């Protein structure tokens, strides 16, 4: 009997439409001969299952089931394609754990930890992983621009602590640009991070569980046409993503080792994509994405393809690994 798989997409953040696109790609590539697959749209106002004609069937939140043609459908596994809240920050996954429903992501605590940039940096720094100099602010804190500049230097990055897809991120080149950038970041989150600028080659490294082992995918070099790898660069073609990256063998070996180490330090499972910048051949860790973009154009699928892993194989591996766990 075919396993019933739900692909959750949507969410409560600015990344809704990116998540829906990722979820539809997963839906299109999962083997319908092997699985019975449904898309599940998770929005603040409704949780619904969508059929091929986009008809909606309400989710029963008591057990995450739904009724189709007078039959109650219960999922065997959920594929998490929600970028941001509540899928990437652990909230939905904690609920799945409570109702004993398997999902493709890491445990909810690991997801919550890695979604919080400050806490992730604190965790990896304790193990000697190199990171940028940073300052952390809560909304309402007194802001001393001179102290910020003294610690981080200029330019510096101002970013929401709990957000993805580069929403709310600014690069401040002058002291006068810092306060407006802070206000932009606060529109996305009540906690923000201010980091020193690292001048070097930026790379993205995918790490995942593949066939029961931790696998580091080919490294991608990020070359943004904009001032940094912002939303426009990520999603509107204003960047070049070069896989494999044009880096030295020494750099490649170092960043692969660090990326795998960070994955293990954070006790991760499932998908991850982390960003690094090389400073004097040393990779500096920026952040980790645990629900990375999964469209054909997204970085992690590009890396998988270079490793000889098709999208169908990539997504099937996540389902099978979860069902067998």
Image (cartoon, rainbow, N blue to C red):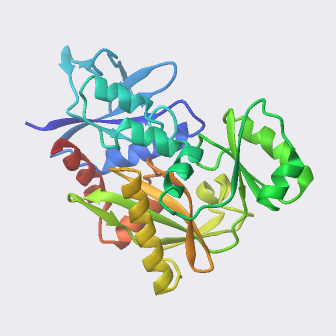
Q: Residue at x 59, y 48 (%)?
A: 165
Residue 233 at x, y = what percent? 65, 60
Is residue 164 at least partly visible in the picture?
A: no
Q: In which quarter of the image is the C terminus?
A: top left
Is 164 in front, or is 30? Answer: 164
Is 92 in front, or is 141? Answer: 141
Residue 146 at x, y = what percent? 89, 51
Residue 55 at x, y = what percent? 37, 24
Q: Quadrant of residue 225?
A: bottom right
Q: Quadrant of the N terminus?
A: top left
Q: Which residue is drawn at 27% across and 23% down?
A: 99
Q: Quadrant of residue 102?
A: top left
Residue 258 versus residue 174 in the image, above or below: below
Residue 9 at x, y = what percent? 43, 36
Is residue 123 at least partly visible in the picture?
A: yes
Q: Which residue is drawn at 24% across and 20% down?
A: 68
Q: Which residue lies furthest to the left in this view?
A: 1
């Amino acid at each position: 009997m075919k396993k019933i798989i739900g692909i959750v997409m949507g969410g409560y953040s600015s990344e809704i439409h990116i998540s829906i696109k990722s979820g539809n790609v997963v839906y299109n590539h999962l083997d319908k001969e092997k699985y019975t697959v449904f898309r599940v749209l998770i929005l603040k106002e409704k949780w619904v299952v969508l059929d091929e004609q986009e008809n909606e069937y309400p989710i029963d939140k008591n057990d995450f089931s739904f009724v189709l043609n007078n039959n109650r459908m219960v999922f065997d596994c959920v594929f998490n394609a929600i970028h941001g809240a509540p899928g990437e920050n652990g909230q939905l996954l904690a609920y799945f754990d409570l109702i004993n429903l398997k999902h493709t992501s890491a445990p909810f605590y690991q997801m919550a930890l890695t979604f919080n940039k400050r806490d992730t940096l604190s965790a990896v720094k304790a193990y000697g992983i190199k990171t940028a100099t940073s300052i952390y602010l809560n909304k309402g804190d007194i802001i001393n621009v001179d102290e910020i500049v003294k610690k981080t230097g200029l330019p510096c990055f101002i970013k929401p602590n709990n957000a993805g897809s580069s929403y709310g991120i600014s690069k401040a080149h002058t002291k006068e640009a810092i306060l407006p950038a802070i206000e932009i970041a606060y529109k996305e989150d009540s906690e923000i991070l201010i980091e020193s600028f690292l001048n070097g080659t930026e790379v993205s490294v995918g790490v995942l569980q593949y066939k029961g082992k931790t696998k580091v995918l080919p490294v991608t070099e990020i070359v943004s046409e904009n001032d940094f790898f912002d939303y426009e660069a990520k999603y509107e073609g204003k960047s070049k993503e070069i896989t494999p990256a044009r880096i030295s063998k020494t750099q490649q070996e170092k960043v692969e080792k660090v990326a795998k180490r960070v994955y293990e330090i954070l006790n991760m499972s499932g998908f991850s994509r982390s960003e690094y910048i090389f400073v004097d051949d040393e990779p500096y860790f920026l952040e980790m994405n645990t629900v990375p973009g999964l469209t054909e154009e997204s970085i992690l699928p590009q890396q998988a393809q270079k490793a000889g892993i098709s999208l169908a194989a990539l997504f099937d591996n996540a389902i099978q690994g979860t069902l067998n766990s």
